[in-house]
Amino acid sequence: MLISGGDPFLLSDERLSHILEALRAIPHVQIIRIGTRTPAFLPMRVTEDLARMLRRFAPLYVVTHFNHVREIAPASERACGLLADHGIPLENQTVLLRGINSEARVLKALFEKLLTIRVRPYYLHQLDLSQGIEHFRTPLSCGVDILRALRGHTSGLAIPQLAVDLPMGFGKVTLSPDFTLRTTDAGTFFTNWQGKECPLPYPEPSETDCSCPHS
Ligand SMILES: *Cc1c(COP(=O)(O)O)cnc(C)c1O
């Protein structure tokens, strides 16, 4: 169950806890996720009381929304640390914005900083089609090229999935760089993060059955 907004953390603790209690009363609700930008723009909203209240509704994930490392103020670090100290797993989504963060160097700094404040980069979003924000749009290749530039140059923990939300309710798809070069009789050839070529031989015929024997 995903609670987004608006911003759920702009509700009072009391109203938010009533909503969470109602959701927890539904037997088939397993995971609760709250999307909030308050750690970026109103970090003082994340109080000890809020963190303690959220703790009661575990498993509950908080998804933050930082777009640039300069949005992570000391107060943002404190807010995320408080949630993490109360056992709340933190993920981040970033929107790819042309001229703001549309460069590997800029996003690497953001994603690495997020890990140090115990927030795992989850999604890098291709900008949605919406009126008035066209100037922020990047070509699809931009995000893919950035992910390619990150692989091997930082921890895999610092590399989110690149998500494209398709129009007309078709849902989300992910894009990722392709490190394969070609496939021959001998196997598949890859290029690594240094641009070096490496073959991966085909498995022996006895190894090609990938079904689990006991399932
Ligand atoms: C992205 C998205 C979600 C969450 O999807 P996950 O892949 O589970 O993170 C839910 N609803 C909408 C409309 C979305 O765009």
Image (cartoon, rainbow, N blue to C red):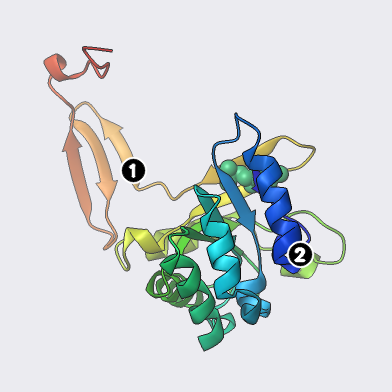
Instruction: Name the amino acid, label 2.
Output: Leu
Task: Work out whether mark 1 precedes mark 2 in sequence or the reverse, and give the earlier one.
Answer: 2
Q: Position of residue 10 (x, y in %)?
A: 75, 68
Element type where label 2 sits in the image = loop
User: What residue appears at the point 25 percent right and 36 percent down from the top-left corner?
Assistant: 188
C-alpha gap between disc 1 and disc 2: 48 Å
Element type where label 1 sits in the image = strand
Residue at the spot of label 2? 11
Q: Quarter of the image containing the C terminus? A: top left
The quadrant where residue 125 appears: bottom right
Q: Quarter of the image containing the N terminus? A: top right
Binning the other alpha carbons within 10 Å of mark 2 as few (below 14), some (14 to 19) or many (20 upward) gives few
Residue at the spot of label 1? 180
The quadrant where residue 184 appears: top left
Pair 1/2: label in front: 2
129 or 182, which lies in front? 129
The extreme top residue here reads 214
36 or 46, which lies in front? 46
Instruction: Name the amino acid, label 1.
Output: Thr
User: What residue appears at the point 50 percent right and 67 percent down from the top-left corner?
Assistant: 83
> Measured along the vertical axis of the image, is residue 162 above or below residue 31?
below
